[in-house]
Image: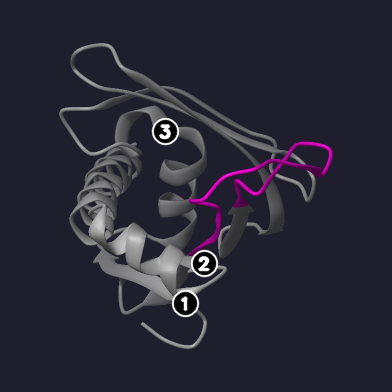
């Protein structure tokens, strides 16, 4: 935690940044929500001002819709989103708004994936931490790694 009111997780995957990017941007329904929850919908328009919409669902059918906007895209290296606004720069209320920064950096023969959540203030950051940021985002990152490494194995055999 820092003056940026930031929470983060980081993992190293045995896949190239390009493959991890592909897993992140094209296979979100397979990894985004920690199991046993599912992610029936992930809809990114990967350009500044584009949509970053996700639907998460509990095993009992409870649905949480996240509508956000893409702030920055550096293909295969970085994507920045927020739920503080929706597509078209429309502000939306919420106590759990933050800026999400996902990075994909080459490391050895693989990729260091880091996900950061930057909050507006300490209270919001602490609330997010107490909601289970570390185990939740960590589980999702592990699932992203599983997808990326599966894709890398498929690429190696084709």
Which quadrant holds the C terminus? top left
Q: Earlier in the sequence, mark 3 or mark 2?
A: 3
Q: Please indicate whether residue 83 sits to the left or right of residue 32 in the image.
A: right
The Cα–Cα distance between marks 2 and 1, rounded to whole angstroms, is: 5 Å
Of residues 156 and 63, the one drawn nearer to the viewer in this rendering: 63
Q: Which residue is mark 2?
A: 119
Q: Please indicate whether residue 56 sits to the left or right of residue 90 in the image.
A: left
Is any atom of residue 111 visible in this view?
no
The correct choice, above or below, for 3 with respect to 143 in the image is below
Looking at the image, which residue sits at the far top?
Answer: 61
Q: Which residue is mark 1?
A: 5
Q: Which residue is at a point 29% across and 38% down the rendered structure image?
A: 154
Q: Earlier in the sequence, mark 3 or mark 1?
A: 1
Q: Which residue is mark 3?
A: 27
In the rendered image, residue 63, in percent from the top left (x then y), is placed at 37, 19
In the rendered image, residue 66, in percent from the top left (x then y), is placed at 52, 33
- Count neighbours of disc 3 (C-alpha within 10 A) and say few if under 14, some if 14 to 19, many if 20 or more: some
């Amino acid at each position: 935690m820092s003056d940026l009111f930031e929470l983060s997780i980081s993992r190293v995957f045995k896949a190239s940044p390009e493959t991890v990017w592909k897993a992140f941007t094209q296979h979100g329904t397979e990894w985004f929500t920690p199991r046993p929850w599912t992610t029936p919908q992930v809809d990114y328009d990967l350009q500044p001002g584009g949509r970053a919409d996700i639907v998460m669902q509990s095993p009992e059918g409870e649905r949480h819709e996240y509508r956000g906007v893409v702030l920055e895209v550096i293909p295969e290296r970085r994507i920045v989103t927020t739920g503080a606004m929706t597509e078209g720069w429309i502000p939306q209320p919420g106590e759990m708004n933050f800026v999400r920064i996902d990075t994909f950096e080459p490391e050895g023969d693989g990729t260091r994936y880091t996900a950061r959540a930057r909050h507006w203030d300490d209270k919001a950051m602490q609330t997010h931490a107490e909601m289970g940021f570390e185990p939740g985002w960590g589980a999702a990152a592990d699932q992203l790694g599983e997808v990326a490494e599966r894709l890398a194995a498929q690429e190696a055999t084709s």
